Amino acid sequence: MGNKKNVKRCTRRFSSGQLSRQRQLPAKSSSSVTSKIDARAAITTASSVRQSLPSKEKIEKNKKINDVPNQTRSDENLPMDGYTIIQNQILHSLMRRTKCQGCGNVWNGAMTTKKREGLFLMLCFECAACKKVITIETSPPIVSTDRRDVNVRAQLAGHLCGIRHAGLSKLLGVLNLPSPVQDETYSRWDKQLLEFVKSTSEKSMARAVQDAVATANTTDLIVIGDGFWQTRGFQSSHGAAALLSCTTAPQVLDIETCRKTCNVCMGALSIKKSDPAKYNDIIKSHRCEKNFDKSSGTMEAAAVLNMFKRSVSKYGVYYTKYVGDGDSKTHNILTKNAPYTDKPVQKVEDLNHFSKRMKRGLDTIRREYGRKKLSDGKTIGGKNRLSAQTVLQLQMTFASTIRKCKHDLDLLHKRSWAIFWHKYSTNDDPRHDFCSDEWCGYLKSVRDGIPYDHTSHALPRPVLNAIKPVFDSLCSRESLARVVNASTQNPNEAFHSLVWLMSPKHKASSGATFEIACHLAVIIFNDGYSALGEIFEVLCGYRGSYTSRAMEYFNKSRLHTEAKEFNRHEKAASARTTSSNNDKKDDSLVDSVADNDDGYHNTFCSTDETSQIDHPSFDDDIRSSTDDQSTSSDEQSDSEDYTYYNPSDSRKWTEQ
């Protein structure tokens, strides 16, 4: 009985609580609906500025160029140009249900393999009664070669997946399929594959140069350069550098690979002592892969210099401005070995690397002071002082300020010092001469005639006096002049990640394998996965139904991910704007500057050719936002802008 009474009592409490929440629901629902409408309006406004995302723009442009009638888009249940895996026992059972052409009886014989080359099989069916033999081949031959279609596709798949010959052997072994071609044959075919892939990437880069010239309306281009290596550290035997266009949809314009070793030469060394004559024949007859004999750390500068020197002869353009990081010696090499006689190469600072100096400087101050007492009797670190979180916030604010004001040195100088003096201000001594009434709560309070309290965002003055030398160094006009019209190397990092997907850094590989990965990454980065169809057409004579569908799927998945990220940032930005308009947010320079411009909006909505994707670390404050309207549920919203991947996706954004 006692348990039943408790259940009834809990039921009554639950019902009354539910009713009370339902009574409060309309007011909350009304405000949330208004906020949601404002958010969608803000997204629509932003979308009107930028009609498409970078990847979508490049992929759609490639579709127009290579718009090939595709019979694979039909609704056939079983495309006849595709492959079907069937177990041998099932195939043998199927043959036993047929009649022999020789004797007319039900076929009953043996199934044997007459020839095998990798995944290609030549199967023989011999009738036990009349001994008639029927031979079939499991894959068509490649025209003018001795290779088979299925082996070529398997080899290319090994490179796209980054598993190569060893990975293919494991995959096929687990699937109970024949092993791939021998490693020696595989390596020999890699050299042929490299020629086809390189030819396709050269065409893609030539189109990218034409697009960059058309966008800039001049042959004097701004390029973003960066080097990368096949393995970690600066002792890698293989490295490369790429130059990308500095536009709203960056593309690879040129790439140079460096090899310090040659597999043939290294293999021949083992027989040098035992058979010198054979060693000499191998060395003389082969084409050596080695093209670089200096230290690995100098690969980037040497590769970039080579690309600058051939820009006129190869494309008829000049790379007059170079976006590089601050710790690279590439620009010094370009200055000492001028690629152009009448056009010096101007250095454009990477704003992400420049803003990191703020963090390094503040961290250095923290280490130097350590446990020393400041004038107020406290250490420099701790709660509401120069903590690690405060250092990161100041860095992000400085980076955001550069992004917003990089086209005006005077404004950039003023807004950079506003970061310091806004924090320096107190109720008794306000210092807001450099602030803007767009975000400064004090100036807004003066305008509206209401009181204002600095306690919530001000730092202790002894702490600010200690870090002022960092601002003196970075926020001077001479220093900030280096980031006027600055850009970032983030497109290069995105390109590098594509290369490392196909040539993982934790696995050593040959120079040919690394170079294939580089050129495949160029094609995918510039034109999308569907552009790989040209390679299949050249190598195999056709793309294939399943191949075309897969490449189209990868493109849609790429667009879905990019649009999903863009929508998440736009929703967060619109939510913050709505909250700011309602005066629901506490005033803070760090929160306001970092929130109003997270860099992502600038990437997709700016028409300036130097705008690039900003460093992900500057968006961490967006991901950790506690705003009710920028929760993780936004990532699964049903916005029309990212329905490329799955139009029938049932996930809906619901207000919590």
Image (tube, rainbow, N blue to C red):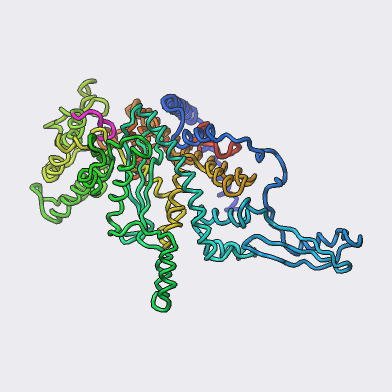
Percent coordinates x, y for residue 84 in the rendering: 69, 54
Q: What residue is rendered at 17% in x and 54% in y?
A: 367
Residue 364 vs residue 155, the one in the foreground: 155
Q: Does residue 632 appear anywhere in the picture?
A: yes
Q: Is residue 422 left or right of residue 145?
A: left
Magenta-drawn stretch contains 478:
no
Residue 600 vs residue 232, the one in the foreground: 232
Which residue extends farthest left?
A: 375
Residue range highlighted in magenta: 402-409
Which residue extends farthest right?
A: 104
Q: Is residue 618 left or right of residue 24?
A: left
Percent coordinates x, y for residue 525 in the rendering: 45, 43
Q: How many marks on residues?
A: 0
Q: Does residue 400 appear anywhere in the picture?
A: no
Asked which quadrant contains residue 316, the reply is: top left
Percent coordinates x, y for residue 259 in the rendering: 37, 58
Asked which quadrant contains residue 610, the reply is: top left
Position above or below: 106 against 528: below
Percent coordinates x, y for residue 357 in the rendering: 21, 46
> Please, what is the dominant secondary structure of the magenta stretch?
helix
Magenta-drawn stretch contains 406:
yes
Asked which quadrant contains residue 280, the reply is: bottom left
Position above or below: 340 against 118: above
